[in-house]
Image (tube, rainbow, N blue to C red):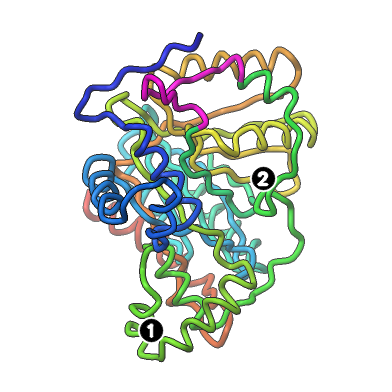
Amino acid sequence: MVKPLKLSKQNKLHSTDVKVLEGLALYGPRNISKLAATINMPSATLRRRINYLRSHFSLRFLGALYHTHIGLRKVLVFAESKPGYEELLYNCLKSHDYWLYVSPCVGASKCLAIYGIPAGREKEFEEFLNRLEELDPICNVKFFWSTCFQNINVTSAWFDNTFEEWIFPWDSWLKEVLTKKGELPYTLKDRDDYPQKADWIDIMILKELEKNCKIKLKEIAKMLGISLQRVKYHFRNHVIEEKMFEGPQIVAEHYKGLSADTYYFRFVFKNYENFASFACSLMNKPFVRVMGKAQGRNQLFVQVYLPRQELRSFIETLSKLVKAGFLDTYEYVVQDLAGAERQTISYEFFKDNGWLYDHEKCLKKLHSTVKQFVGAA
């Protein structure tokens, strides 16, 4: 029997709360009435419960974009610096116009960064990374072109409703991984084309949804100074119809009180079948936040959110997969989320229904960042 992890009463997440989190991801935070009816809860009570989750479990309503359909290619970068130059590395990674996410790592002078690069500009971005690695304090710059990411919202799959505690049945998961069959979501499939399907209004809608998927369309219309009818048309016929928006990203500290950490893993598989089985097994797991596939490779990137005391069991399970010949290898970093930053798509560089990319400007910003750091030191 899997022993549940105990939480203090003030940090306790109840089964009703888990249902609320699941429902918010399924129906979206704007469909409160539908969610209330589904879980048999008065709408006013549901709103109070959501406010409780926001204040006690850092509940946020973000939006996941399908960057592939707006002409952007995802790329993950892992970089290292000499001790004492962590801030320089961090700022250099942010000096590029198209950064989406930058996070320092714990226990080493490392950072990870995610970018959305306009399709066709891959070589110039790789030159930017080469220039970064040529800097004396910077080393070991690795990059991986990726598919778009698959967002994984909280589910009740590993929540014990009797004890109202999270459980971690690693042995059962191991069996599931070895036998799982299923179809991967389109976000985790290799693409050869990156069509730019958006116009300026679409991009402005997307960047607002990315910040807050709960935002009302009439607020966006007011912000843009155009009619609500026009915004609704673009939202329905472009953003949704052309699959530019994947859906709500419901983020909460659902392991609060269990000393949870966030990790970024890279898993390498011997073949596509093993990769697909592993990825499909994670689609409903509460310890996964985001997944992405390395373009043209049987490699999976996974952001893992896990109670610290469960990390050892997770690693032991991975070791069993390696010994069984299912998993080739893996590596991971521990993220320092207190220092992590996220920004929306770089809408300010979207002009005439296309992305502007000034390579020389990016290189100059990189040089300027280094010069400022040296001057400050």
In percent of width and height, residue 58 lies at 28, 44
| Rendered image quadrant of residue 259 | top left
Question: In percent of the image, x 62 and y 47: which residue is there?
Answer: 144
Residue sitting at 53 percent across and 48 percent down? 151
Residue labelled with disc 1? 221
Q: Is residue 292 left or right of residue 107?
A: right
Q: What's the CA distance linking mark 1 and mark 2? A: 37 Å
Give the amino acid type for the residue marked by disc 1 in the picture: Ala
Q: Position of residue 92 (x, y in %)?
A: 40, 54
Residue 56 or 350: which is nearer the viewer? 56
Q: Do we see residue 211 in this rendering?
A: no
Element under label 2? strand
Residue 294: give its label. 2
Image coordinates for residue 343, horizontal then vertical, percent = 39, 60
Residue 286 is one of the magenta-drawn residues: no
- Range drawn in magenta: 157-172
> Where's residue 63, x and y in %?
45, 59
Q: Amino acid at mark 2?
A: Ala
The answer to whether one can see residue 192 in this image is: yes
Q: Quadrant of residue 61?
A: bottom left
> What is the residue that sits farthest to the left in this orientation?
10
Callout in the foreground (1, 2): 1
Dot 1, how many residues are within 10 Å of its Cα: few (below 14), some (14-19), or many (20+)?
some
Q: Nearer the viewer, residue 7 or 261?
A: 7
**Is residue 259 left or right of 207 when viewed as pictured?**
left
Q: Are marks 1 and 2 in contact (CB under 8 Å)?
A: no
Against 322, residue 206 (above or below) is below
Q: Is residue 69 above or below residue 110?
A: below
